[in-house]
Amino acid sequence: MYQSLLGQIRTRVVHTLFRAPFTIPIGRPRRRMQAGRPGVPAARVAGAPAAGTATPPAKRPGRNDPCWCGSGKKYKHCHMREDMAAERTSVVHTRPPQTPRRRRRR
C-alpha cells in the first residue's frame, strides 16, 4: 500500500515536471556577456583602482563589507592588511616596557 502511494507520487511529479509550460519572456533583449566580474566597470577589472579616486574612510569598514576603494572585493581581501599595517606603524606606545617581576617561592 505504501509502495503504491510512493509510485503514484513519483508518477505525478515526473508528469508535472515534464509537462510544465515553459515560456521564454519576449521583449527583453539579451545582453552580451563581458569578461570579468559582474557589476564592476571594465576599467577596474584588470587591476587596482584608479589613483586618487577613493580615499580611506575615517572609520574602517567591517571585514565582510565591500572595500572602500570600490573594487567590488570584500575589505578583508582587498585593503584590510595594508590599512592594519599602516595603523600599526602610526601607533606610538607611550608606556615603557615592563621589567619581569620576581615570583615568590612557596
Image (cartoon, grey):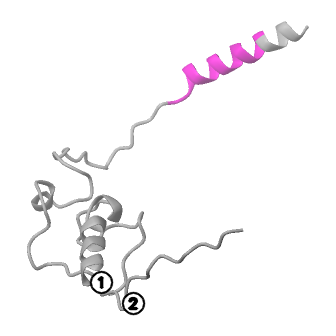
Residue 32: x and y in percent read 18, 45
Left/right placement of residue 39 relative to residue 18 reads left
The residue range painted magenta reads 7-21
Residue type at numbered disc 1: Pro
| Front residue of this view, candidates 37 and 31 | 37
Residue visible at 27% across and 73% down in the picture: 83
Q: Is residue 88 above or below residue 21?
A: below
Residue 47, picture quadrant:
bottom left
| Front residue of this view, candidates 45 and 88 | 88
The residue identified by callout 1 is 57
Dot 1: within a 10 Å radius of its alpha carbon, few (fewer than 14), some, or many (20 or more) residues? few
Alpha carbon separation for disc pair 2 and 1: 29 Å
Q: Residue furthest right?
A: 1
Q: Is residue 85 above or below residue 45?
A: below
Residue type at numbered disc 2: Arg
Q: Residue furthest bottom?
A: 94
Which structural element holds mark 2? loop
Q: In the rendered view of the protein, which quadrant contains the N terminus?
A: top right
Mark 2 or mark 1: name the one nearer the start of the chain. 1
Residue 99, picture quadrant:
bottom left
Left/right placement of residue 43 relative to residue 27 reads left
Magenta-drawn stretch contains 13? yes
Specify the principal SS of the magenta part: helix
| Front residue of this view, candidates 67 and 14 | 67
Residue visible at 34% across and 44% down in the picture: 26
